[in-house]
Image: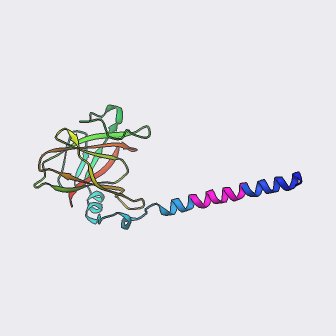
Amino acid sequence: MGARLRILLAAGLLSAGYAGWLLGSGVAAAAESSGCDQFKWPIAHEQAALAAPAAGPLAPGATLPADAGARLKLIPFAEAKLALAPERPPKFSPSYAGAFALDAPAAAGVYKVTLSAGGWIDVVQDGKFLKAVAFSEATGCANARKSVKFRIAAEPATLQLTGVGDPDIAVVVSPE
């Protein structure tokens, strides 16, 4: 096989690989959930609460209103006084965080913590993290980006947000 033919063959294989890579990237991007209907559960109530927060901006340490949107003012992660170190450390810098009090709910049950932007959500109760019951997120949904369900006892708890890329975020904690 001549040198010229080997070069053409190599260029063709590289082009095919690059085209496959581009196709693969497009498939991955197309598979990403986009739009409010891509959440695993209805979020119309939460979306409305996040669009017009009833409270805020609230600084870390404040008590969040029950079943109403709140605008939060987060602080740099290194300055945040969290009840427990987050289960997942922030992936980027700068990263913002905050811990907020949750009054005891009227009844124990599953509650959704829904954010207007991406971030890591932890709920602390009795000095330990609660395990998430379910998780859902979608891009391209006005006012809502992430929603996580937790089983919360009828006693006070702490909501910790970490890994948020902006110091301003809206949140709503609502019963299932």
Q: Is residue 161 magenta?
A: no
Q: Is residue 54 left or right of residue 22?
A: left
Q: Residue at x 26, y 48 (%)?
A: 131
Q: Where residue 24 sits: x, y (%)?
A: 58, 59
Q: Where residue 12 sits: x, y (%)?
A: 76, 58
Q: Where residue 95 sits: x, y (%)?
A: 39, 39
Q: Is residue 127 visible?
A: yes
Q: Is residue 68 visible?
A: no
The residue closer to the viewer here, 73 or 145, is 145
Q: Residue at x 17, y 53 (%)?
A: 66
Image quadrant occupied by the C terminus: bottom left
Q: Is residue 57 left or right of residue 4?
A: left
Q: Residue at x 38, y 65 (%)?
A: 38
Residue lying furthest front? 1
The residue closer to the viewer here, 62 or 33, is 33
Q: Is residue 17 left or right of residue 48?
A: right
Q: Number of labelled discs?
A: 0
The residue closer to the viewer here, 103 or 142, is 103
Instruction: Point out the stretch of residues depicted in magenta.
Output: 14-24
The residue closer to the viewer here, 105 or 10, is 10
